[in-house]
Image: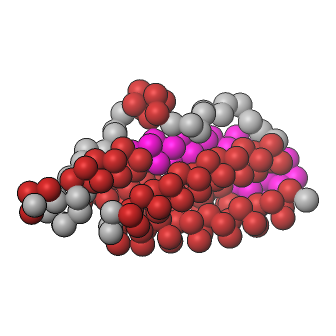
């Protein structure tokens, strides 16, 4: 029975499924990062200074999460996706291009965060079933942050 578990004691089959879902989250975070980076560079208008800084905050946070997700995949004995061709194949978040309007940019970010939180909740459920406390903790933290961010962004849009 012991060889049915990986090095950290998680069922190997559940670990494979977790890694697949984590790789999808990783791909979506990479696309989110690129979108926010582009918005940071290209935003114009009255809210430029405010949004330019806020978008930088979001992409700096995304970089940290991207690394944490990839390292969690490695901890679960998987291999993180690491090419943009792979990201484009599996990500639900699509690339955005040429957006300069602040409200339009915020709407894109809201939609991207909405996609990410659905994926995080799926992983949380699966990790909980697998008794994978490390992934549960990571996803719980991400979900709490994303919920608050979505509240703030939707308040901005009103």
Is residue 3 inside the magenta stretch?
no
Q: Is residue 74 left or right of residue 19?
A: left
| Residue 42: quarter of image | top right
Q: Please state the total of marks drawn on the protein image.
A: 0
**Residue 12, horizontal then vertical, whole percent:** 21, 53
**Residue 24, horizontal then vertical, whole percent:** 44, 43
Question: Can residue 95 be spotted in the picture?
Answer: yes
Is residue 40 inside the magenta stretch?
yes
Work out whether residue 64 or residue 12 is closer to the camera in this orientation and state it: 12
Q: Is residue 66 left or right of residue 52?
A: left
Work out whether residue 98 or residue 127 is closer to the camera in this orientation and state it: 127
Q: Is residue 123 left or right of residue 146?
A: left
- Kindly identify the residue that appears in the image at 56 percent across and 37 percent down: 92
Question: Can residue 109 be spotted in the picture?
Answer: no
Q: Which residues are magenta?
A: 23-52
Tell me the quarter of the image containing the N terminus: bottom left
Q: Is residue 126 left or right of residue 92?
A: left
- Kindly identify the residue that appears in the image at 59 percent across and 69 percent down: 145
| Residue 47: quarter of image | bottom right
Colour scheme in use:
secondary structure
**Residue 48, horizontal then vertical, whole percent:** 78, 53
**Residue 100, horizontal then vertical, whole percent:** 77, 39
């Amino acid at each position: 029975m012991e060889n049915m578990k990986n090095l950290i004691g998680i069922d190997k089959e559940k670990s494979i499924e977790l890694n697949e879902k984590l790789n999808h989250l990783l791909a979506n975070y990479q696309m989110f990062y690129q979108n926010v980076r582009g918005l940071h560079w290209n935003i114009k208008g009255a809210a430029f200074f405010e949004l330019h800084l806020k978008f930088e905050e979001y992409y700096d946070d995304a970089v940290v999460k991207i690394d944490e997700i990839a390292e969690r995949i490695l901890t679960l004995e998987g291999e993180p996706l690491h090419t943009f061709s792979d990201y484009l194949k599996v990500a639900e978040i699509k690339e955005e291009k040429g957006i300069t309007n602040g409200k339009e940019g915020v709407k894109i970010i809201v939609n991207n965060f909405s996609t990410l939180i659905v994926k995080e909740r799926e992983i949380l459920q699966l990790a909980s079933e697998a008794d994978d406390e490390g992934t549960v903790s990571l996803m719980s933290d991400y979900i709490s942050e994303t919920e608050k961010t979505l509240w703030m962004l939707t308040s901005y849009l009103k």
